[in-house]
Image (cartoon, rainbow, N blue to C red):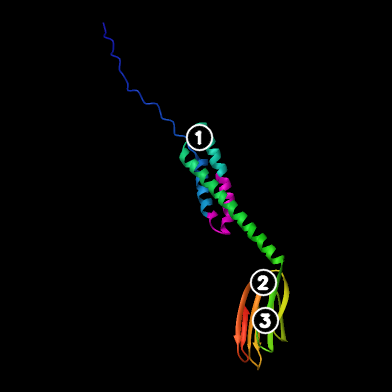
C-alpha cells in the first residue's frame, strides 16, 4: 500500500501594494503660486503674476478636492501652493490699486489750474523784473521795469513744472526781495542789496 505524499507548503506571496495616488495639480498650484508671488513684487514684470497666481489658486483648489476624495496626496504642498497664490493675488491687487491711484492723481494734477503769485518789495527806486512760468509744455517769460513794491498773479493750466522770478536793482542801488507763492503757499524768497544786485527765486 503506497504511502500518501506529504503535502507541500508554498510560501504565500504578499499582495502588491497599490501605488500611492499622486497630486500633480497640487504640485502645479504650488509651483505657479511660488513663481507668481516672486513676480508680484516686481513692478511692470509683476503683470505676468496675475495669470500665474490665478492658475495657482485653481490648480491648488482642484488638488485639495482630489485629496478630500482620497484620490491624491501631498496635502501640505497643495495647501502651501494655495496660500502662496492667494498672497500673490493680494499683492497684485494692491499694485493695481496703487498704480490706478497714481495715474488718477497725475491726471488731476495735469488738468488743474495753479495760481502763481510773484512779488517784489524793497527800497530800490527802480528795478528790472523778469518772471517766467513753465506749465506743461508752455513757457511764458516776461520782463518789466517797475517801481517797488510790485506784484503779478499768473494762472498756469496743467502740471506746473517750475519757473523763475529775478529782480535786479538799478544804478541807485537799494534792496530788493523777491517772493513766489504757489496756490497760497510760499515757495521761494531771496534778497539782494546794492547797485545792480540780483535776487533770484527759481526752481519752485
Residue at 59%, 55% (x, y): give it: 95
Q: Which residue is mark 3?
A: 120
Q: Earlier in the sequence, mark 1 or mark 2?
A: 1
Q: From the viewer's perspective, is 59 left or right of 102? A: left
In this view, the residue farthest toward the top is 1
Nearer-the-camera pick, 151 or 5: 151
Q: Earlier in the sequence, mark 2 or mark 3?
A: 3
Where's residue 43, x and y in %?
Answer: 56, 59
> What separation in Å lies between label 2 and label 3 (alpha carbons)?
15 Å
Span colored in magenta: 39-56
- Badge 3 marks a residue whose secondary structure is strand
In this view, the residue farthest toward the bottom is 171
Residue at 56%, 48% (x, y): give it: 53
Does 77 sit above or below residue 113? Answer: above
Q: Which residue is mark 2?
A: 182
- The answer to which image quadrant residue 187 occupies is bottom right
Mark nearer the viewer, 3 or 1: 3
Mark nearer the viewer, 2 or 3: 3
For residue 72, say whether it is visible. Answer: yes
Q: Residues within 10 Å of mark 2 (few under 14, many from 20)?
A: some
Q: Which residue is mark 1?
A: 67
Amino acid at each position: 500500500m503506497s504511502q500518501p505524499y506529504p503535502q507541500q507548503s508554498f510560501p504565500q506571496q504578499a499582495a502588491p501594494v497599490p501605488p500611492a495616488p499622486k497630486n500633480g495639480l497640487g504640485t502645479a498650484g504650488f509651483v505657479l503660486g511660488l513663481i507668481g508671488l516672486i513676480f508680484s513684487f516686481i513692478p511692470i514684470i509683476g503683470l505676468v503674476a496675475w495669470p500665474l497666481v490665478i492658475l495657482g489658486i485653481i490648480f491648488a483648489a482642484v488638488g485639495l478636492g482630489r485629496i478630500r476624495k482620497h484620490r491624491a496626496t501631498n496635502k501640505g504642498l497643495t495647501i502651501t501652493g494655495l496660500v502662496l497664490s492667494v498672497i500673490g493675488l493680494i499683492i497684485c491687487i494692491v499694485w493695481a490699486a496703487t498704480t490706478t491711484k497714481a495715474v488718477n492723481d497725475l491726471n488731476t494734477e495735469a488738468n488743474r489750474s495753479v495760481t502763481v503769485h510773484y512779488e517784489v518789495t524793497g527800497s530800490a527806486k527802480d528795478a528790472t523784473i523778469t518772471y517766467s512760468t513753465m506749465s506743461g509744455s508752455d513757457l511764458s517769460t516776461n520782463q518789466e521795469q517797475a517801481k517797488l513794491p510790485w506784484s503779478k498773479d499768473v494762472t498756469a493750466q496743467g502740471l506746473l513744472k517750475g519757473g523763475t522770478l529775478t529782480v535786479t536793482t538799478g544804478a541807485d542801488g537799494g534792496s530788493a526781495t523777491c517772493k513766489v507763492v504757489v496756490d497760497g503757499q510760499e515757495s521761494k524768497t531771496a534778497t539782494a542789496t546794492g547797485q545792480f544786485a540780483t535776487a533770484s527765486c527759481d526752481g519752485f
